[in-house]
Image (spheres, rainbow, N blue to C red):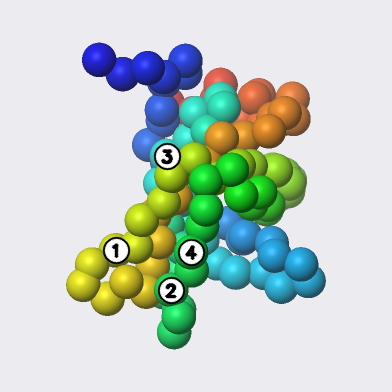
Amino acid sequence: MEKRRYKRKTFHLSAERISGDKTFAVFIENLSEDGIYMITAPSDSPINFTPRETINIKLKLSSGEVLNLKCNAIWSYKTHPSGLTSNVGMEIIEAPAKYKEFIKTLR
């Protein structure tokens, strides 16, 4: 039995992960009101995410509006056999109202 507070919505979006002054492409696979599941773009060196690590996501909506989301990593693992992408489950810290409105529009 799942322990989720909010239903996940499968929705494939391109986004960016912000780390310092650098941006990295990521792919959002599903969303909920309080969480995101993302896959990092392939890179030459694997990225390690530790539980509770802060991850900043820049999400561009179809309206053109950009949402900046501050998240905590909950879990992560590298894909096999290459290990050059990472799957990451994140909890959104204080989701902005615009994000919650966006989630309600998804089917």
Which comes before the other along the chain, label 4 or label 1?
Answer: 4
* Callouts 4 and 1 close, C-beta under 8 Å: no
- Pick whichever of labels 1 and 3 is earlier in the sequence: 3
Residue sitting at the far left? 81
* Left or right of 49 on screen, residue 39: left
Q: Position of residue 33 (x, y in %)?
A: 56, 25
Return the residue at label 3: 30
- Is label 2 in contact with label 4 (beta carbons under 8 Å)? yes
Q: Earlier in the sequence, mark 3 or mark 2?
A: 3
Residue 20 image offset from top left, x and y in percent: 76, 67
The residue pinned by badge 4 equals 48
Residue type pointed to by label 2: Pro
Name the secondary structure under disc 2.
loop
| Cα gap from disc 4 to disc 3, whole angstroms | 21 Å
Gap between marks 1 and 3, in whole Å?
Answer: 17 Å
Q: Position of residue 82 (x, y in %)?
A: 27, 76
* Of marks 1 and 3, the one in the foreground: 1
Near mark 4 (Cα within 10 A), the count class, few <14, some 14-19 or many ≥20, is few
| Contact? badges 3 and 2 (CB < 8 Å) | no
Q: Residue at x 63, y 42 (%)?
A: 71
